[in-house]
Amino acid sequence: MTNRDLSTLILDRIRDVPDYPKPGVLFKDISPLLADHEVFAAVVDALAGSEPVDKIVGIEARGFILAAPVAYRAGAGFVPVRKKGKLPSETLEESYDLEYGSATIEVHRDAFTKGDRVLIVDDVLATGGTAEAAVELVRRAGAEVVGLGILMELAFLKGRERLPGVDVRSLVIV
């Protein structure tokens, strides 16, 4: 399957939901994509890539859905990055702004071994705040970010600009 074919399959299976979670926001619902085994498997394979990594980070919540099978496919461990207050052990935290507010994410302090090679996976790259915060958390924990694997990048929000020096790999750019 070519990248162009995969892009078309992805776009055909993402539903736009206007005014969710608040008026003026166009939510990108990936549920139809997840329900299609063939396309979901192709997305997991494409996000996993071929570069060896030690850990795959999934950003709450939809990033978990993609990152866990990517970790399995890549032969790597899975590390959840969660909203503040959701992890039971000692954490590192990072706050950031997003399109419609602000938030704080956390990762367990002991989630990485110094020098781990880490791929961060999420569903959408919008303004880049969440991704930038996740990159900072991984680096503060002593690991190396080898890339950011994204299902869909909303280029008009310029999130990539907040990630200088990070290899951003988007399967679809709209």
Image: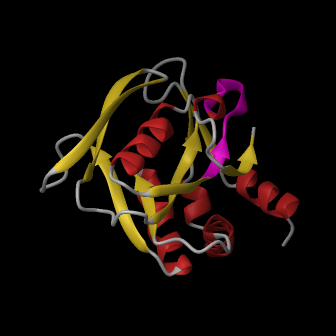
Q: Quadrant of the C terminus?
A: top right
Q: In this rendering, is residue 161 above or below 133?
A: above
Q: Exactly how many numbered labels are in the figure?
A: 0
Where does the image place residue 29, in percent across and percent down from the top left? Answer: 55, 46
| Residue depicted at x 49% and y 36% | 132
Where does the image place residue 81, in percent across and percent down from the top left? Answer: 34, 51
Q: In this rendering, is residue 1 above or below 165?
A: below
Looking at the picture, tell me which residue is in the foreground, 89 or 19: 89
Lateral position of residue 78 relative to residue 1, left or right: left
Q: Quadrant of the N terminus?
A: bottom right
Residue 132 appears in the picture as rendered: yes
Quadrant position of residue 146? bottom right
Residue 60 appears in the picture as rendered: no
* Residue range of the region highlighted in magenta in the rendering: 150-159
The answer to whether residue 126 is magenta is no
Where does the image place residue 173, in percent across and percent down from the top left? Answer: 75, 42
| Residue depicted at x 54% and y 24% | 25
Looking at the picture, tell me which residue is in the foreground, 144 or 170: 144
